[in-house]
C-alpha cells in the first residue's frame, strides 16, 4: 500500500495527519518573507513529526478507503501491517517519505525526523517559488563616457546641448528599482490578506454551525441511539471525576447528547463507555440539561481530532463545547 503518497496528499488539506499507533505529521504556516537583499519566499508550511500523537483520528484511513474503494476496517488492518514493517525497518536503517522527510532512530532509540523542505504544501502558494531580485548595475561617474565633440567654428551659440548620459542612467536605475520594490510588496500583501480572509471565513462558518447545533439540542430531550461499532486501537482508562474537583480547569468536550432526565443521561454515558470511549458528564447547561460527552480534554487539539472522527468518519451528530 502506498501510504506515503496518501500522506503527501493530506498534508495539503490538514494541519495534522495521524498514522495510527506510529505518530503524526504536523504543519505550521509560515508567511511571506522579503528581506533587504532582495530575497522573496512565498507562504509555505513547516513540517514536523510527533511520535506521541498516535490516537487514530480516522482521516488517513477514510481518505485511503475513498481512493481505493476499500472498506474502512480493511484499510485499518493494512495500515497496521505497514506500521509493523516500518518499526522493524527503523531498527537497522532509515525510512524515507518522498518530498516530506526522512526518519531514523537516534541514540535514545527515539524517532528523529528531518524534513526535506523541497516541496511547498501550502496550496495557496501554487506556482510561486523563492527568488532573488538582483540589483541593477551602478554606473560609476569615473567611467569614461564617449561624447560627441562638436566644433563651433563660427563661435555661434548652439540652439541645443547634448543630454548627459550619466543623468539618464541614474534616472532609469531609480525608476526600475521603485517598480521592482512595489511589485514585490504588492505580491506579498495579496497573499497575506487572502490567506487571512480565508481563515477568518472558515472560523465564522464553524461558529454559525455550532450555534445552530446548540439551539436544536436545547429545544428537546432526545436520545442519539447506539453508535456503530468500529475497531479502534485505543487503550481506554476511565476515572469517575466529579465536576466539582475540576473547577478552575478549562476543558473542551465533544457532546453526544443533552438530556432533561439524569437517568437517560446516565444510560447514554454507560453506552458510550461500553463502546470504548472515554465518556464523561460535561458541564450542566444553564437550562438544567445534563450533557454527555464522547470525551473531555484539557487540550483543544485533541478535542477537535475526536470531533472530526465522530462527525466525518462515524457520521454521527456531535458538537464542540468549551467549558
Image (cartoon, rainbow, N blue to C red):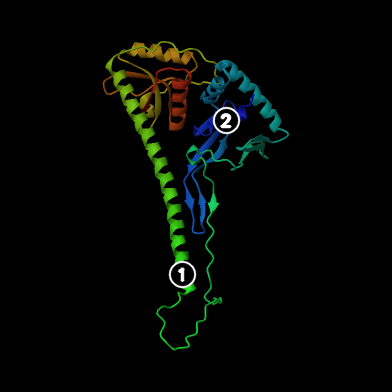
Answer above or below: position of 140 versus 125: below
Q: Residue 49's spot in the image, x, y percent? A: 57, 36
Residue 257 found in image quarter:
top left
- Work out whether 189 lies above or below 214: below
- Residue at image position (39%, 11%) is 267
Q: Which residue is drawn at 54% across and 20% down?
A: 66
Foreground residue, 133 or 84?
133
Q: Is mark 1 on a helix, strand or loop?
A: helix
Which of these two is toward me, 77 or 91? Answer: 77
Q: Residues within 10 Å of mark 2 (few under 14, many from 20)?
A: many
Name the residue tied to disc 1. 168
**How many numbered markers are drawn?**
2
Mark nearest the camera among 1 and 2 is 1
Q: Is residue 246 visible?
A: yes
Q: Mark 2 points at which residue?
A: 7
Using the rendered view, name the quadrant where residue 134 is placed: bottom right
Question: x%, y% of residue 297?
Answer: 44, 28
Amino acid at each position: 500500500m502506498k501510504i506515503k503518497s496518501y500522506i503527501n496528499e493530506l498534508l495539503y488539506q490538514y494541519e495534522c495527519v495521524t498514522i495510527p499507533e506510529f505518530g503524526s505529521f504536523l504543519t505550521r504556516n509560515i508567511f511571506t518573507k522579503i528581506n533587504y537583499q532582495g530575497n522573496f519566499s512565498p507562504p509555505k508550511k513547516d513540517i514536523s513529526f510527533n511520535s506521541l500523537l498516535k490516537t487514530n483520528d480516522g482521516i488517513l484511513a477514510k481518505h485511503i478507503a475513498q481512493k481505493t474503494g476499500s472498506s474502512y476496517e480493511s484499510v485499518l488492518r493494512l495500515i497496521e501491517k505497514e506500521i509493523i514493517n516500518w518499526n522493524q525497518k527503523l531498527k537497522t536503517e532509515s525510512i524515507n517519505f518522498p518530498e516530506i522527510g526522512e526518519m531514523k532512530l537516534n541514540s535514545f532509540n527515539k524517532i528523529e525526523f528531518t524534513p526535506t523542505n523541497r516541496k511547498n504544501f501550502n496550496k495557496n502558494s501554487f506556482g510561486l517559488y523563492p527568488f532573488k531580485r538582483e540589483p541593477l548595475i551602478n554606473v560609476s561617474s569615473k567611467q569614461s563616457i564617449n561624447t560627441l565633440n562638436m566644433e563651433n567654428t563660427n563661435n555661434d551659440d548652439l540652439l541645443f546641448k547634448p543630454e548627459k548620459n550619466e543623468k539618464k542612467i541614474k534616472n532609469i536605475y531609480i525608476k526600475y528599482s521603485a517598480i521592482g520594490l512595489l511589485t514585490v510588496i504588492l505580491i506579498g500583501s495579496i497573499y497575506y490578506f487572502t490567506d487571512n480572509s480565508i481563515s477568518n471565513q472558515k472560523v465564522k462558518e464553524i461558529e454559525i454551525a455550532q450555534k445552530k447545533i446548540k439551539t436544536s439540542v436545547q429545544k428537546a430531550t432526545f436520545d442519539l441511539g447506539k453508535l456503530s461499532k468500529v475497531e479502534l486501537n485505543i487503550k481506554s482508562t476511565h476515572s469517575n471525576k466529579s465536576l466539582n474537583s475540576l473547577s478552575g480547569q478549562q476543558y473542551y468536550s465533544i457532546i453526544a447528547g443533552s438530556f432533561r432526565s439524569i437517568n437517560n443521561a446516565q444510560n447514554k454515558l454507560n453506552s458510550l463507555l461500553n463502546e470504548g470511549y472515554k465518556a464523561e458528564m460535561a458541564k450542566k447547561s444553564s437550562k438544567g440539561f445534563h450533557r454527555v460527552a464522547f470525551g473531555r480534554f484539557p487540550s483543544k487539539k485533541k478535542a477537535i481530532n475526536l470531533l472530526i472522527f465522530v462527525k466525518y468518519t462515524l457520521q454521527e451528530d456531535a458538537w464542540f463545547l468549551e467549558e
